[in-house]
Amino acid sequence: MNTINKITGILSSWGNYFRIKAVSYWLTSLKIPDALIKTAYIPYGNGRSYGDCALNSTILHTTKFNQIISFDNKLGIIQCQAGILLADILEEIIPHKWFLPVTPGTKFITLGGAVAADVHGKNHHKEGCFSTYLLNLELLLPSGEILQCSPQKNAALFRATCGGMGLTGVIISVTFKLKAIQSTLISQKTVLSNNLEATFAAFEKHNTATYTVAWIDGLTSKKQLGKSVLFIGEHDSQGSFDYSSKQSLSIPRYFPSFVLNPLSIKLYNFFYFRKQNKGIQKVPLNTFFYPLDAIKNWNRIYGKKGFIQYQVIIPKVNAYNGIYELLYKIQQSNHTPYLIVLKLMGKENDNYLSFPLEGYTIAIDFKMGKHLLSFLNQLDQITLSHNGRAYLAKDARMSQPFFEKGYPRLKLFKDIRTFHHLENLQSLQSKRLGI
Ligand SMILES: Cc1cc2nc3c(=O)[nH]c(=O)nc-3n(C[C@H](O)[C@H](O)[C@H](O)COP(=O)(O)OP(=O)(O)OC[C@H]3O[C@@H](n4cnc5c(N)ncnc54)[C@H](O)[C@@H]3O)c2cc1C
């Protein structure tokens, strides 16, 4: 039976910059709700994308479609319904000594959201995107047809769906390979660098490590631009399998906007960078992969107007200059970068709209404020002049020309949409970008 609930209310995504009135339906069976047959809608996972890729006036929620269908704990192959959270998959697989092959910086996303954004982790330079590990996915088209997709079967639709931001159908189940681990501890090495050149040198020196990520202090002098702490991680070879996804701290309501200001973040950065121990430590998996998950609703710190994360990637040959220019432009402006993360990325895959390419990606959080949008357009010019592009899962504002220049396989993606009659699948983002 097709038991679908319907609710009208205000919906947002992680950045809280967009707040829209939407009619929400829930996927609870293998059928598109009748009300959506002639309506434009977009699948919604757990709303951890930052901008408007999961927003529209009609939404199809997937989180009630959240069961593990099968788990071969000998081979490390799992099939789940797409609305399950990565956090719930971890609870199931870790006691059997398996981990996710690729994980983003939060475990509170759905499996469908992981595929639709083709997420990357701290291991992209060595192990690629989430889609690398997919054996199959089942896709429910607006016509009601269900197609099996993999690199071998319906390959073009598979390439469009991984990274396709929900615009090719509703992913209903995903089968993928897990990664064997020997403990839930991570052997973490910390390297402090005093400027961007040293940060890049540290990344390159450790480019054979499995996981690397740098947190950059965005409030330094020009001389120290790009000062960072680089975390390098490997799964430890021994230890327990203790694990819990529970969050103990929470921010119950939005902070007043004056709380987060350049002075408070300067103080925070000062203590954060001072407290880092150089050398090697064993840290729990949650600490290494999901530091921001420790506080539920941390996005409320930015106040009611929300925030924007500017995440772009720049090919390796241009990466140092491009990222230096971005950081310098920000330093010269009155827009405060509250959080900056830098990652080394490996080879581009064959998917039509996946974000990563061989180079460096930088993600910068800005509190929403006066003139921020026009300032970000200026950052786009720098990104573009270094042949970079922005990440759709974080985007809330890029222009269509900027998007089109960054994604040369867009035409293949659009052809797939036309071929399978997917015009009903629309988000605020897809309309803005003319996808
Ligand atoms: C703290 C934090 C850290 C993050 N770190 C990273 C990171 O390191 N690397 C990275 O790559 N991303 C990262 N992200 C982004 C996040 O992984 C992606 O935005 C992800 O897509 C969110 O999944 P979701 O389930 O919340 O989906 P939503 O935000 O609800 O939706 C995202 C997109 O997926 C589509 N979608 C969702 N479910 C389905 C489905 N079943 N079928 C078809 N389409 C679907 C939606 O239409 C939308 O286009 C981070 C986000 C946060 C909040």
Image (cartoon, grey):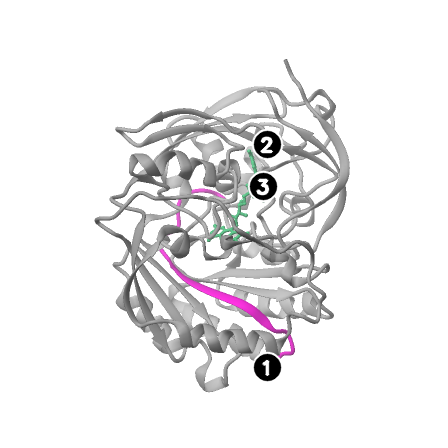
**Mark 1 vs mark 3: in front:** 3
Q: Does the magenta segment cover residue 389?
A: no
> Would you name the residue on which mark 1 appears?
332
Which residue occupies 36% across, 67% down? 230
Element marked by disc 3: loop
> Would you name the residue on which mark 3 appears?
46
Viewer-proximal residue among 359 and 309: 309
> Would you name the residue on which mark 2 appears?
62
Magenta residues (range):
332-352
Q: What whole-number distance in Å separates the C-alpha atoms at marks 1 and 3? A: 36 Å
Query: Is 160 above or below relative to 73?
Result: below
Q: What whole-number distance in Å separates the C-alpha atoms at marks 2 and 3? A: 8 Å
Q: What whole-number distance in Å separates the C-alpha atoms at marks 1 and 2? A: 43 Å
Give x and y (percent) for residue 204: 30, 67
Viewer-proximal residue among 207 and 160: 207
- The amino acid pointed to by label 1 is Gln
- The amino acid pointed to by label 3 is Asn
Viewer-proximal residue among 136 and 433: 136
